[in-house]
Amino acid sequence: MTSRINQFGPWALVTGANSGIGAAFANRLAAQGYNLVMLGRNEKTIQQAAENLTTKYGIETRSIIVDLSTEGFLQQVSDQTADLDVGLLISNAGGDAMGALLRVELPDLKQMLHLNTTSHLELVHHFGRRFEQRGQGGILLVSSTAALQGTPFLGNYAGSKSYQLNLGMALNYEMRKTGVNVTVLMPGPTNTPGLTEKAAIPLSTLPAPQMSPDAVAKIGLRALAKNKPYVIAGIVNQIMSGIGSLLGRTGGRNMWGGLMSSIVPAELRVR
């Protein structure tokens, strides 16, 4: 399978590559013939995923076991990719700490904020410079439709995802003459462990259809090939985002606050 996105090769780096949307990106890129640098925290799962893709598609892989929420991770990534011609960055890893802000412990909020903001900044800055020097490349930031409004019970998450959205949108403009494409992908509810395995807040019960990770990855890669500044994954998510926009910032917040209020348990509320 070929695509215009193949101009970014021969190596792609994918964070959070062993599950969910990251795994879907890795599979699609491997099918296109990309060699993969796969980042994740769990050594067993990331190495097994890499071996499976090598066996299935005959590509080269390199696993980097690293926690992107910790200080100093970039040096490890830089050292272990210095000898590779990486041309594509899929900055996908992220996390959440859900509940009313005052009901979530501060260390959890700070760890999530670092993972969802600083790690993306460091990766984009490092590989963006490398791509600029090689005269071509691609950067895909995975944000969320939560970035489009202050989302109650996901306030810190929504704020961090808004950072990714604005960072990527600005970078798309700044790099438009460098041969480097930059796109922000905004999924809504997606059938990943992050959605389906939340015991405290059952996000899977929200009245919105769950997209498959593969469908989300496909949309993101197509948008990146066209150098779109951003793309909202799926028609339903686009409609919901449009309704939120029509309602205004406060109205959009209230809409999502009502949806979230129906599933958030009492112990994770302020009152």
Image (cartoon, grey):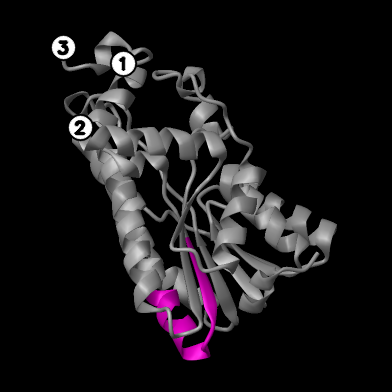
Read off the residue under disc 2.
250
Position of residue 66 in the picture relative to residue 45 (left or right): left
The residues tagged by marks 3 and 1 sit, at their Cα atoms, a distance apart of 12 Å
Query: In the rendered image, is residue 148 in sight?
Result: yes
Is label 2 in contact with label 3 (beta carbons under 8 Å)? no
Quarter the C terminus occupies = top left
Q: Residue at x 40, y 70 (%)?
A: 172
Residue 226 position within the rendered picture, expressed as x and y whole percent measured from the top left:
57, 67
Please tell me the numbered disc located at residue 261: 1
Magenta span includes 134: yes
Pick whichever, 245 or 193, lies toward us.
245
Read off the residue under disc 3.
271
Q: Quick check: 208 above or below 49?
A: above
Q: Residue at x 45, y 23 (%)?
A: 203
**At numbered mark 3, what does the secondary structure look like: helix, strand or loop?**
loop
Disc 1 residue crowd, few under 14, some 14–19, many 20+, Cα 10 Å: few
Position of residue 227 in the picture relative to residue 268 (left or right): right
The residues tagged by marks 2 and 1 sit, at their Cα atoms, a distance apart of 16 Å
Magenta segment range? 125-140
Quarter the N terminus occupies = bottom right
Disc 3 residue crowd, few under 14, some 14–19, many 20+, Cα 10 Å: few
